[in-house]
Image (cartoon, grey):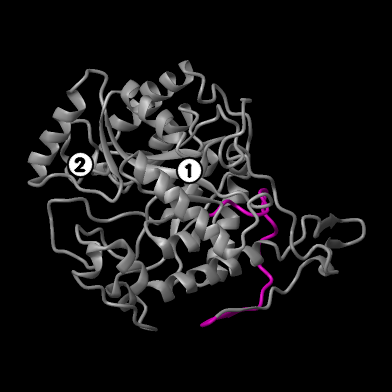
Amino acid sequence: MTGTPGPNGTPGTALHLAVALDGAGWHPAAWREKDARPGELLTADYWAALVAEAERGLLDFVTFEDALGLQSADFHRPDDRTDQVRGSLDAVLLAAHIAPLTTRIGLVPTTNVTHTEPFHLAIGLATLDHAGRGRAGWRPQISSRAADAAHFGRRTTPLLTEEDVTDPELIAKRLRELFAEGAEVVEAVRRLWDSWDDDAEIRDASTGRFIDRDKVHHVDFHGTGFSVKGPSITPRSPQGQPPVVSLAHASTPYEFAALGSDVVHITPHDRAGTLAIVAQVAEAVERTGRDVEARPLRIFADLLVLLDDEPGAAAERLARLDEVAGAELTSDAQVFAGTPAELADLLIDRRSAGLDGFRLRPGALPHDLTAITRGLVPELQRRGVFRTEYESTTLRGHLGLSRPAGRYETAD
């Protein structure tokens, strides 16, 4: 697609769309819907079918949720509920399974950066990028629950209070050290991804040389609480640097995104909130000294969506799900219940407030995913604001991000 450049350097007609996949859907009662498949949530085929549907809809990427503890209705601690989905698969391994079953869509697993070694993260994600031939992304996530630390026994993390979780800025302040450490982990991983030059592999049987050892580099990264010597064991992947994606709700996470992310997901609840948060992200970019000309930061807004073709049907379905759950649905993201055409109106209007795209969280699976791919996408295509075919084979290409050169290539 072509058009007038948008606010962050993307073509003016190219609206980006991603989908966040989680369990049976983002409504806690979704697993009890008639078309839900609760008995298959821990099977690879279930997830492969969802991603195949997202790819049929020409979406930029899908994200896979992950955590170090069971899902909980409480942000800061485990719960003992048995009426909601509990249990999940490892996000990176799941994405690696799906990679050869798909051809174009980006695959973005979530991983923990508080208790996971940067070296292991780097090689796992680089391997995923090799498996997907350039379609891997990465969503780094800090561990905000003190209970998660007990799985490892090496450290403690802040125990959040009820007062903390009522205010995103207060949470961010309490977790500032973990975000700072997370930014160091992202930097260490990026350096490991660059530790092999693109042409380090020679593979010349006649001379007996498989690699050029001068083109495989020690990274010698020293963080506040860890160090990484390197090099990686995995050669540089097709994208060089798989795009880093982060979710941000407050000033500290905005800085985290400005330091090391290629895409940031924000959670405004209206147009005014969108304008305010986009401005806060811009301020964070300026504070960190990021050169957005050289390293663009794509801004996506998250929306939790329930979609039906018949006007009013989605709102009725939401009310029924709330009744089954015993509580009204609440979310960090805006909850939208309406028709695909109504959602298209919102996306187009909201995008003009400074967004590059949206990550949609289907309320119930597979219903709301197919409503996105077979209802919303054709509506956006009719309006000329969404692709009619994939024009790139890599996730960086979908996002309009160039492939970066390895940082050590001139240090020989």
Q: Position of residue 235 (x, y in %)?
A: 70, 59
Q: Which residue is mark 1?
A: 98
Q: Identify residue type, mark 1.
A: Ile
For the N terminus, the quadrant is top right
Span highlighted in magenta in the image: 224-244
Q: Secondary structure at mark 1?
A: helix
Task: State the residue lying farthest toward the top.
Answer: 382
> What separation in Å lies between label 1 and label 2 (alpha carbons)?
22 Å
- Determine crowd level at label 2: few under 14, some 14-19, many 20+ residues with C-alpha closer than 10 A: many
Q: Is residue 236 magenta?
A: yes
- Residue 38 shows which numbered tag? none
Q: Identify residue type, mark 2.
A: Trp
Q: Position of residue 17 (x, y in %)?
A: 46, 35
Regarding residue 141, the answer to whether it shows in the image is no
Disc on the earlier residue, 1 or 2: 2
- Residue at the image point whose x is 13% and y is 63% from the top: 80
Q: Which residue is mark 2?
A: 31
Q: Position of residue 374 (x, y in %)?
A: 38, 22
Q: Secondary structure at mark 2?
A: helix
Residue 301 lies in what quarter of the image? Answer: top left
